[in-house]
Amino acid sequence: MNDCLFCKIIAGEIPCNKVYEDDEICAFHDISPQAPVHFLVVPKKHIPTLMDAKGEDAALLGKLLYKAQELLAARGCAEKGGRFVINCKEDGMQTVSHIHIHVLGGRPLLWPPG
Ligand code: 5GP
Ligand code: ZN
């Protein structure tokens, strides 16, 4: 956990371009944006992947998702929407082992993914 990149960002040890923060959640711009709007919403609690979430984390996961849409709407994407993505483990091509929701908007996004 001490080696976790997103825990270090949450702790302020690594700088980020912050979008939102409260006692349970942090959101910051992705360092490599894939759309005009691309930020990550993460819990402050270190949970490596979605598959590691426990029943006790259900409310926190719901809050992450709700906040994700609220923050996207606040960036002018309420009408056209966007995409909310959680990559998970190896087959999901997750590269940072701390749950995060990618929030993308501001252009049409292709589907299905490659
Ligand atoms: P994953 O591939 O795990 O779903 O997503 C990890 C995301 O974290 C990638 O989109 C990547 O660009 C982003 N990322 C990696 N390192 C950093 C960093 O140091 N700062 C920020 N803001 N984003 C990062
Ligand atoms: Zn972490």
Image (cartoon, grey):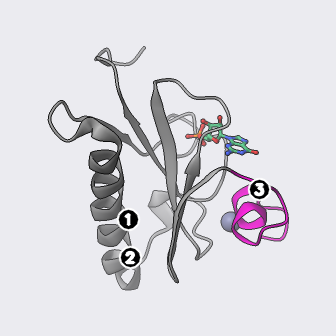
Residue behind mark 2: 60
- Magenta-highlighted residues: 1-16
Between discs 2 and 3, the one toward the N terminus: 3
At mark 1, the secondary structure is helix
In the image, residue 107 sits, relative to residue 50, either above or below, namely above
The answer to the question of whether label 1 and label 3 lie on touching residues, with beta carbons closer than 8 A, is: no
Left or right: 106 in relation to 80: right
Amino acid found under the numbered disc labelled 2: Leu
Residue ID at (33%, 46%): 72
At mark 2, the secondary structure is helix
Horizontal and vertical percent position of residue 73: 26, 47
Residue 5 got which mark? 3
Looking at the figure, which quarter contains the N terminus? bottom right
Gap in angstroms between the C-alphas marked 1 and 3: 19 Å
Horizontal and vertical percent position of residue 85: 39, 41
Whether ligand 1 has any atom under 8 Å from the Cβ at mark 3 is answered as yes
Which of the 4 image quarters holds residue 2? bottom right
Residue behind mark 1: 64
Horizontal and vertical percent position of residue 43: 52, 69
Give the camera-side residue of 19 and 60.
19
Residue ID at (58%, 38%): 90
What number of labels is visible? 3
Left or right: 39 in relation to 18: left
Left or right: 69 in relation to 22: left
Amino acid found under the numbered disc labelled 1: Leu
The answer to the question of whether label 2 and label 3 lie on touching residues, with beta carbons closer than 8 A, is: no
Within the magenta stretch, is there residue 67? no
Left or right: 38 in relation to 109: right
